[in-house]
Image (cartoon, coloured by chain):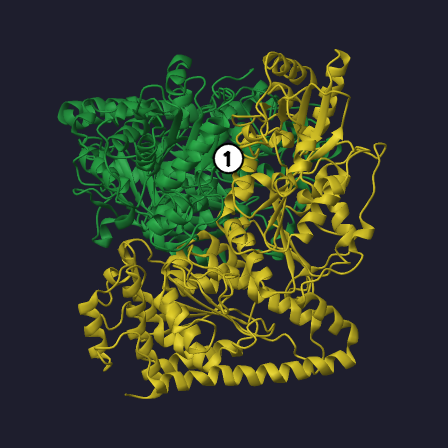
Chain colours: A yellow, B green
Amino acid sequence: MADIDTACINTIRCLAPDVVQKANAGHPGAPMGCAPMAHILFSRFIRGSPAHPKWINRDRFVLSNGHACALQYILLHLTGYNISLDDLKSFRQLHSKTPGHPETNHGVDGIEVTTGPLGQGVSSAVGLAMAEAHLAATFNRPGFELINNYTYCILGDGCLQEGVQAEAVALAGHLQLGKLICLYDDNHITIDGDTALGFTEDVCKRFEAYGWHTQVITDGDHDIEGIARAIEIAQAVADKPSLIKIRTTIGYGSKNQGEEKVHGSPLGEADILNVKAKFGFPTDKKFYIPDEVYGFYKNFSLRGQQLYAQWTETFATYGQTHPELHAELSRRLAGELPAGWKDALPKYTSASATLATRKTSEAVFNAIAERIPEIIGGSADLTGSNNCWWKTAKDFQPPATGLGTYAGRYIRFGVREHGMAAICNGLHAYGGLIPFGATFFNFIGYALGAVRLSSLSKHQVLYVMTHDSIGLGEDGPTHQPIETLAELRALPNTLVIRPADGHETNGAYIAALENRTGPTVLVLTRQNLPHFDTSSAEGVLKGAYVLQDVASPQVILVATGSEVSLAVNTAKELANSGVHARVVSFPSWELFEAQSQEYKDSVFPEGIPVLSIEALSTFGWDRYAHASVGVNSFGISAPASQIYKTFGLVPDVIAEKAKRLISYYSDRKPEWKLRKPF
Amino acid sequence: MADIDTACINTIRCLAPDVVQKANAGHPGAPMGCAPMAHILFSRFIRGSPAHPKWINRDRFVLSNGHACALQYILLHLTGYNISLDDLKSFRQLHSKTPGHPETNHGVDGIEVTTGPLGQGVSSAVGLAMAEAHLAATFNRPGFELINNYTYCILGDGCLQEGVQAEAVALAGHLQLGKLICLYDDNHITIDGDTALGFTEDVCKRFEAYGWHTQVITDGDHDIEGIARAIEIAQAVADKPSLIKIRTTIGYGSKNQGEEKVHGSPLGEADILNVKAKFGFPTDKKFYIPDEVYGFYKNFSLRGQQLYAQWTETFATYGQTHPELHAELSRRLAGELPAGWKDALPKYTSASATLATRKTSEAVFNAIAERIPEIIGGSADLTGSNNCWWKTAKDFQPPATGLGTYAGRYIRFGVREHGMAAICNGLHAYGGLIPFGATFFNFIGYALGAVRLSSLSKHQVLYVMTHDSIGLGEDGPTHQPIETLAELRALPNTLVIRPADGHETNGAYIAALENRTGPTVLVLTRQNLPHFDTSSAEGVLKGAYVLQDVASPQVILVATGSEVSLAVNTAKELANSGVHARVVSFPSWELFEAQSQEYKDSVFPEGIPVLSIEALSTFGWDRYAHASVGVNSFGISAPASQIYKTFGLVPDVIAEKAKRLISYYSDRKPEWKLRKPF
């Protein structure tokens, strides 16, 4: 065996093909090519304690080229995290801890964010680094560097081509995130072949244009000391994020090294023998890890344990000198909301001035933002339209800009919706923060790649989405969401809430802040809406509730958001012709589904036909409604009231349809939608 | 009045606030700031004929900052396109020709692509320039420069922050698109305020990193000769796209010029008076256009008419010397598919080897790609997985790379899903081409911003989406679409087809190629599927059809794609216990909805309960089915068959559910889903 670094690197290079081969699926090439940089990171730089994997001041490591996860699983195993050799052997198998791409909150410590969908990892790494900068500025005091960690990220050519990456790293440059260090696995290979096919930009120059510090390592297969030095230099550059471009050979050691063939398929047994022979490893052993390698990596947990112990001591002392800050950080790390935060929520009556729900949302921000200081976020350059700025908000900005500090909690995301969502995932993944991102509802369509990962990875992110229908008016069909509500309702583990007025907006935020294991999408109007005396936050928490009732209702009008008042007016119109209509406000399908059958039955009793009213696509409403009015084409540019009228979303037209619905079921009972055979 | 250029520019600067004020909504600032560059483009550079607005060799102009569309409408009016002064007066009003953001295929000539959602315009402009390069390489011959136009694009800070833009312009640099010229309205203002808040990158340096040529104009408010010279220089750079960064003052002339206040709201009457006085225009007149300005812009149509006449003559001569090429271009411009293209579609029987539909899709490409030479496209770096490369395909590449030529029709999009879709919109908008883009189905979620514009703008784009469910197996939940089918089914004017086997894949492509007024999403498996003797392309064109029947069916099993064979096996299982099940293959909801009521009733007759089977979210299936089996959580990383089993997607479990469904309706008729009260 050669020196211990080489032994470790070669162990990874021999182990990764075994892991992939046993699974008969996966990506051996990048783990083999990235073995040197990953080994150097874990053995010399990353500070973490496998015994205390959630230690807040650990360094964060993100493998943005998540398909290379055999590498990450191997390193987590070697450094003592909760991945066993058996877990490596069950790579990509049913219910294993080692799925095809790294999933955070999946039972494996050391996976900070979910990666695999390209560009997401590095973008969330920007969020992790922003969280560190913010919490450091918030909690550190002279002599107490409680929050002081690096965020390391390995990324490949794929990530560098993705738009979400461009958005996030551009912002990272502006924000001068000096503790974000990215190692670019420059292997010249994408799935289609050589990067010459379509990725010929000067990556370092681009990053410099964003304000990054860049370095180049020309032989990343061997120059481990060069890599180590570059990381040290990057650490020393405090006012710029760093990119280290490291030229590597994909599948280093394979007979097909340097070719796309080694990217996404097992090497095959013959080539694996060749690899092991080349590195002087026993060819008759699979999953072989020399004792000296295990022994060397033990230093990782020993160092981490020591750092953790020191930190714990420091934190205790901090508790004596800064008891309030200590209590505050402790509360946040425990994941508890501050007591009494709901007390300040605004109150309304039907006599209150009409308000858009983007404005009642603003009222919530003003009421709670200072009471819940872990709230951090901003808008994709629509602050004045999304109304998510609160009166005492301060900008999250590098102090050098003179525009704010890292202690600020209002983030200027820029016109970067996808980057914003991916950054929010990173902010939440860090811990101690509840991030939010805002834009027009229609443009959540730009961000779905990252929103989906909020849902999959159980990140509590608040998506504050305003201008939620044709009701936005003149901006027209390019900006009017139609399919968007259905899209999000179809997404698993995603709480979608479309409140109807002030009280319901309060309820929406209560639900969102108490939903700790997934994102909440708040769907808010541009246009003013009346308040109801019978609306309530409690009603929102049940998903749907009877807002207005009559004896022996003949029809149930169910609506969400801005169409609840339309339903109320339709009920009035129906009452004028002697028809009894119940009005149900239905702000959240997911919350309703979580209620008892008894409660659900009380809202939608057997035998009464249901008509849904929503100024978006009716897609999906068949689940609850016997007929629907909505908008099943693209919208129109015009004043909002004229658009509503054009689509028949006015009381008299809907009342007519309600009568047709009642008459349709005059000779039989409508199917009870709440009953299913299974 | 000053010189004519200044008169024209000031006319625009006075007219734009009038247009916005009358609408009481819109964006006056950018039109006023961009007036000089836009005037110079239209008066000195853009070649187009309002009398022949679809002339194939016209220059393309894209206003990527689409919110500034008052500018574009004004210039189209002044240059003689079909926008009247009354149309300008009905800006943003119901059913006007001048909606809040420019919409192509909306009755207004000169709007090449839809813009407004930021980043889309410039990205589609890349597609327009690629189309020009391709058609020039395909049809030009010595002495016949039939295709030889520029693509001009004005874009702002917003577009430059969007990821879709980064993806598209990076590819444009690689592709050396010398005839793409972008004018960057560098006004230092975004909606939130000064760009210092979050957009501080060195834009020119970034574009140079991509391989663009860049220039800077420091006084874009006045230096019209400088702008003109820069455009000339840009034209002379043949092997690089050009960015001209032009420093302007947003709202130039307003008392709030240079501030975000003038961005998105009417200036107000007082300020409008101030603007008009400042530019020496009559303050008592609204929508005032001096005769000399009208007179000057007449040159646009005169020049265009002359160029068009010359071109027509050249094209006629070309018809004599190159009759086949002439016929081919004429056919394409007429929007007709070549005769007999379907003849070569492959045939299958149930004895054929099982094939993934991504492979039967590949067979279609091999059969038709040379017969329909307007097909052009590629994959977002998943060529070998999406199987959209055909045997005789050649790369679309700059000749200097040695990797292909502009006559090639296979595009290496790189890992740029959103850019790919926006580019496809531009390729289609140019004319004479049918573009396709391919990736994993899950990652259409990255591209939805542009896919939505394919639908809104009626672009015939084929989205070839493979790996369409949990059936992709080991890559796991990060890659397994769940909500994705529902998402696209909810999107208006979008044809979604999920074929079950080889014949149905043929049908899917027939439908896609004949659907000339919108995109088609082809949803294809990774895993192998059997072929059916009773499946057919004709069945696909009807959306749904009876694949397998029995006398007196007790239940209808309806499935799509890979679950059709599961339905067939479930029917077999049911038959073993004496239960009669019809099997309906339902590849496309949209095509089914277009059928006669009689046909629809024949597929789903009254009185028979329907069970849907699809290995994705069941969201939306209540429209047709009385019960559904599917996947309503995120997926799992494991071999595909084990995942199917875990989710109960196996014949015995489904058969059991079918029996429960039948028993549930044993005492009454199920609601007939095809009947609605309205």
The x, y position of residue B231, in whole percent, is 42, 44
Q: Quadrant of the N terminus of chain A?
A: bottom left
Image check: A231 left or right of B88?
left
Q: Is residue A494 visible in the rendered structure shown here?
A: yes
Q: Secondary structure at mark 1?
A: helix
Chain bearing mark 1: B
Q: Nearer the viewer, residue B178 or A269?
A: A269
Q: Is residue A255 visible in the rendered structure shown here?
A: no
The x, y position of residue B77, in whole percent, is 52, 24
Q: Is residue B103 above or below residue A373?
A: above
Residue A429, located in which quarter of the rendered image?
A: bottom right
The number of numbered badges drawn on the structure is: 1
Q: Is residue B534 above or below residue B400?
A: above
The amino acid type found where label 1 is placed reads His
Image check: A342 left or right of A184?
right
Residue B599, located in which quarter of the rendered image?
A: top left
Residue at 69 percent of width and 31 percent of height: A603
Q: Is residue A620 above or below residue A178?
A: above
The x, y position of residue B223, in whole percent, is 53, 45
> Which residue lies under the disc numbered 1?
B39
Image check: A262 left or right of A301?
left
Q: Crowding at label 1, few (<14), some or many (≥20) Cα neighbours within 10 Å?
A: many
